[in-house]
Image: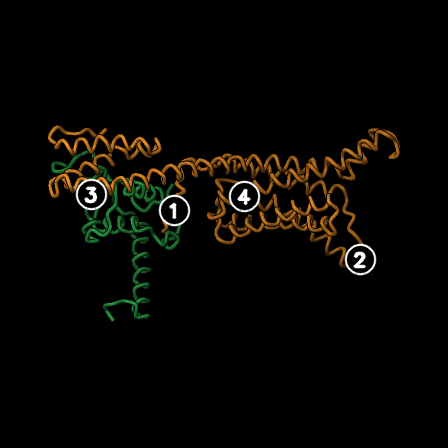
Amino acid sequence: MITTQPPESFLPLTPAVFHILLALADGEKHGYAIMQEVETNTDGLVTMGPGTLYGSIKRMLAAGLVEETDERPDPTLDDQRRRYYRLTGLGGQVVEAEAQRLAAMVMLAKAKQVMAFGM
Amino acid sequence: MFKITTTDPGLVSLSTNTYRLLLTFYPNRFRREYGSHMAQVFRDCCLHTYRQSGPPGMLALWALTLFDWFKTVIEEQFNRGTEMTQSKFIRLSGWGMILGAITLTFGFLADASTVRTWMYRLLGTPDTSEGFQVYRTVSDNLGGWLGFAGLLLLVAGIAGLRLRYGKLAGRFGHTSLLLSIVSGGIAVIALLGAYLEWDGAWYIMLYGMAGLFAFLALFGVAALRAKPMPRWNGLPVLAGIGFPLFTVIALVYRVVSGNSLEAPGWFQNMILLITFAGLILLGYVLQGDAPQDEDIHPLQA
């Protein structure tokens, strides 16, 4: 079911959902590419298995944050059986809202001088 | 369906086949939808790890994958169970509201002065007669038990209404339905208290009922704005307005005149009929609008 909830109502996101949305922020990707991107973006700190990946994707599809796409970047180079996902407008708003929320928390941590760097 | 290619190393093929077996533990619907893609992603992971780290890397991959499998199998099975339970509860609560309206109406009628008069005429005997005394004993007890059962069913119906439409109606509507349930719960307890002859229990029951219907009507105001129901969004106001309106009129009359209000029978019956019709139709809408494919698992951390 596609919801029409405001982006803030989805916050805070689980780490898996946030990283998947971030991975899709610069273009559509298939499941394995999302996993690789998350691992690269976090220097291997966040690794998700296929269950977490597709469980999250299922919920994000239901919430209208991502959608499947039939387009292929290059059909000759890719397996036609793969499913590609991309952000929806709402998904973009939600990842932006979550990033702003996290940035505000970092600012607060800096103000309280609990961070080792960046004082 | 995904198939293993013959060029995969033996350890990768074995791992992928084993993982495909593990996929059978997921709910059927989830497996049908995502199973082949999960197996394909796992195979990609195996190939990448095997090329980079060989068999020791595969061991580490399996440790991570088994943890992920165990956690998400529980999540998806629980999710399926909760989804079914919620859907079933909403459907049943719709029927509960219909049955509650009927039961409550019979409860009122069993005790109503109009019906007593009809029975008196029907039996054709003075109120000291044996026939009338039997009727009176039955109606006194039946009215109470029907009222108790009807109130319980109505509270369950409103709980289903809140689960289905509460959030869609906004914070005001959501909170109104919570207060309606709380008021209904107080009325149920007070009705039991009245039978145990607690002081003031009867009045607490009446005000609890007035609260139940008043907050249902307030939810109706929110529903008229947000339109959370597929149709007939005015029903909660229709079902909820009569009883509290009557209570307020009676209270004002009592304060102004110092006497109890003796409302005409037709007025009481009209309010009963409007409330009855509103609840029946509301229950009908609710039982027919239980979510089928809605994913209720939260995205939030």
Cα distance between the residues tagged 4 and 3? 48 Å
At mark 3, the secondary structure is helix
Q: Residues within 10 Å of mark 2 (few under 14, many from 20)?
A: few
Q: Are marks 1 and 3 on the same chain?
A: yes
Q: Mark 4 highlights which residue?
A: B159
Between disc 3 and disc 2, the foreground one is 3
Instruction: State the hue of chain B.
Output: orange
N-term mark: 4 or 1: 4
Instruction: State the hue of chain A.
Output: green
Q: Mark 1 highlights which residue?
A: B298
Q: Mark 2 highlights which residue?
A: B258
Between disc 4 and disc 2, the foreground one is 4
| Amino acid at circle 2 | Gly
| Amino acid at circle 1 | Pro
> What label sits on residue A93 in the rendered view?
none
Between disc 4 and disc 3, the foreground one is 3
Residue B42 in picture, x, y percent from top left: 21, 37
Between disc 2 and disc 1, the foreground one is 1
| Amino acid at circle 3 | Ala
Relative to the observer, which residue lies in front, B70 or A66? B70
